[in-house]
Image (cartoon, rainbow, N blue to C red):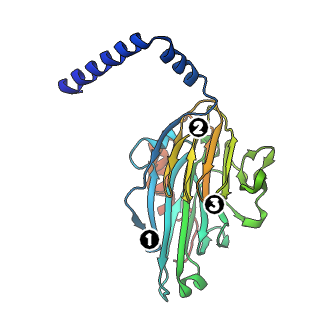
Amino acid sequence: MERKDFIRKGIFSSVVAYIAAAVGNPLKAAAKAAAKSPYRGVEGVLSPTNTHMVGNGFKVMNFFPNGKGFEERMSPFFLLDFNAEVHYPPSEISRGVGVHPHRGIETITFAYKGSVEHHDSKGNHGIIGPGDIQWMTAGGGVLHKEYQEQTYLKRGGAFEMLQLWINLPRKHKMTPAKYQSIVHNKKPRVKLPGNMGDVYVVAGEYEGTKGIASTFSPVHMYDMHLNSNADFRFSLPAGYNSGILVVDGSIAVNGHNAPENHYVQLKNEGGDIHIKASKNSLILVLSGEPLNEPYVSYGPFVMNTQEEIKQAIEDYNAGKFGFLQN
């Protein structure tokens, strides 16, 4: 801190102390009331980052890791790339991400508008459209590719997607690769009272309703579709790393405004999460128990040691991840 800032802050603190002494009990009472707030604290509301292309088909903004230490802050969630709504013209040329490897993580793709097709070296294939999810466990190693599905590609139109990486615990790093196809109408749904909207439970549990996805560490994941009159409360485990992405619409989280395409980081503490929607909104709620394990990342590999990263590269170069046509 520069000297001028130190002096300025010192003067400000002195003035606050003087006012507090002058007014006495009312300020103390307000402080006590704030300390007893029933709501979970909001650490910050992050605005969108500059966009960049992933392959030639996904124009994303990255909310974490983004060089801000979020690899640890949101563990076990490791990466959040969001392709906010864009409009693509019709095309005969494929758009997407070509064949590439992963090890040590799970990759989850949410489709909001448009459709995406997936192939991997374990023989899995899937197409997801609005509301659908593809959940790929890379585990010990897999090759995959994702691209805009042919019917959408030739038609063009609105395109909105999200990709999330979840770090696998050390004991599950080398688990066999697998694929979960989650269709929107199969997600367990909790209807909010008063026609406020729906909570689709992707993973974990919401108000006693269990999610559809299987996970390797404790995770809660909710796909919330809210109407403009939504005003409700829910809670998440105090020690879990938790955040909310506003995909579409606009909400307030415990009194903090969060417009479209903004991310809300919640503090790790107890208390309710109070959400009010000022318009029809679509939000993604993430909450997970921290892994509290060392990690080393290198591109598409996330492992626990540098030696494991070196082994992943050697195994990939040796063809041990299988084969997939580009």
Q: How many labels does the image show?
A: 3
In this view, 156 is above or below 60 = below
Find disc 3 in the rendering and name its residue: 136
* Camera-side residue of 290 and 13: 13
State the residue lying farthest toward the right.
208
Query: Looking at the picture, which amino acid does disc 3 mark?
Result: Met
Find disc 2 in the rendering and name its residue: 291
Q: Is mark 3 on a helix, strand or loop?
A: strand
Q: Which is nearer the N-term, disc 1 or disc 2? A: 1
**Numbered tag placed on residue 232 in the rendering:** none
Q: Which residue is drawn at 53% across and 21% down?
A: 30
Residue 225 makes an appearance in the image: yes
Q: What element carries label 1?
A: loop
Query: Looking at the picture, which amino acid does disc 1 mark?
Result: Gly
Estimate the spatial distance between the alpha carbons at disc 2 and disc 3, rounded to whole Å: 19 Å
Q: Residue at x 45, y 63 (%)?
A: 60
Q: In which quarter of the image is the N terminus?
A: top left
Category of crowding for the residue at label 3, using alpha-carbon neighbours closer than 10 angstroms: few (below 14), some (14–19), many (at least 20): many
Query: Looking at the picture, which amino acid does disc 2 mark?
Result: Leu
Classify residue 237 by image quadrant: top right
Find disc 1 in the rendering and name its residue: 55
